[in-house]
Amino acid sequence: MAKICLICGSSEIGFSFKLAATEVFTCRGCSFSFCDPVPKQESESAGKISVETSESYTHRLMNTYSYKNLMYENLAINRDRVYQKYLGKANYRVLEVGCASGGLGKGFEKLEAEYHGIDIDKRLIEYADMPNVKHLDVMDIPEEETYDVICFSQVLEHITDPHAFCQKIYDLLNPRGVVHCDVPNHGALSGRYRSVFMKSDWRYGSIAYPYHVFGYTNKALKTLLSKWFSVKVFSSNPPNKVWGQTRHEPWPLKHSVFYKISGLIDKGSMLVAVGQKQA
């Protein structure tokens, strides 16, 4: 049976490479890469339309350090400025899908925004111990529950039905609401470094079977989101003060020259999309 791209619907699919338990294909139309077959495994970190997350990554999310709390707080403050600019107001409701232990929520607590977080992994929610952070699959949120901002970091690469997921985000957003997400960049320069020097899972771009089974490029991410949202898509790196992450990078990935080069050629380790709901 012919393979169909989950993003653009094209049947122009090319074989990329083979892994132990799967094969990886790439759409010639939108450059989206995907594993076939996709793993179907029971896990506390897997949802109705999502594959599991690495247990080691989950446990890292449950480790709280003072430096990470400060990084989360700074990210919340800097993103709040962007969200306010889009919305034209300081008092808004924000939903973080895949919030883990609610690190960003602690930062938003000091702002005028009303933060809500959800995660499908009950262990992370219990660790968070925050009133507005719940154990819930986004697909189960009633549509009358709406938000001004919905953000999700490192989530979309786990989603097996990206159109259903994006439609749900659209339905939950208020008119002109803001969507903000990031995914691993399938064409990142850091992936090439890891491939040569570290022999890590990222030697296949952003594919890290069985956890990351979909690889997004700038074109693929924009193709997907543009059906529902007016977005700009760009690459970034973990140290970025607005779009980054709370993690330490190995040397020389964290070196400013390396990140400047990868940013200039749009090969940062993350792809970021931000914009508003279309009318």
Image (cartoon, rainbow, N blue to C red):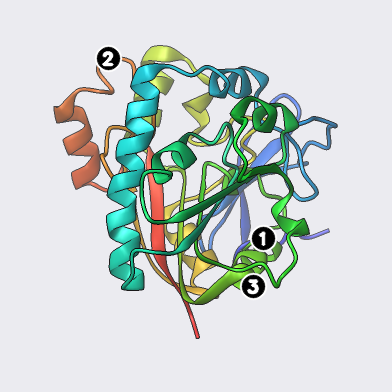
Image location (x, y in percent) of residue 6: 67, 60
Residue 226, compared with residue 213, is above or below; it is below
Q: Looking at the rendering, which quadrant does residue 142 occupy?
A: bottom right
Task: Give the amino acid type for the residue marked by disc 2 in the picture.
Answer: Trp
* Dot placed on the residue nearer the N-terminal end, 3 or 1: 1
User: How many numbered discs?
Assistant: 3
Instruction: Give the Cα separation between the discs numbered 3 and 1.
Output: 10 Å
Secondary structure of the residue carrying tag 3 is: helix
| Image location (x, y in percent) of residue 216 | 50, 50
Q: Secondary structure at mark 2?
A: loop
Left or right of 111 on screen, residue 125 = right
Residue occupying the point 63% across, 57% down: 13
The amino acid marked with disc number 1 is: Phe
Q: Are marks 3 and 1 in contact (CB under 8 Å)?
A: no
Q: Dot 3: few (<14), some (14–19), or many (≥20) neighbours within 10 Å?
A: some
Q: Nearer the viewer, residue 57 or 205?
A: 57
Q: Between disc 3 and disc 2, whose residue precedes? A: 3
- The residue that label 2 is drawn on is 251
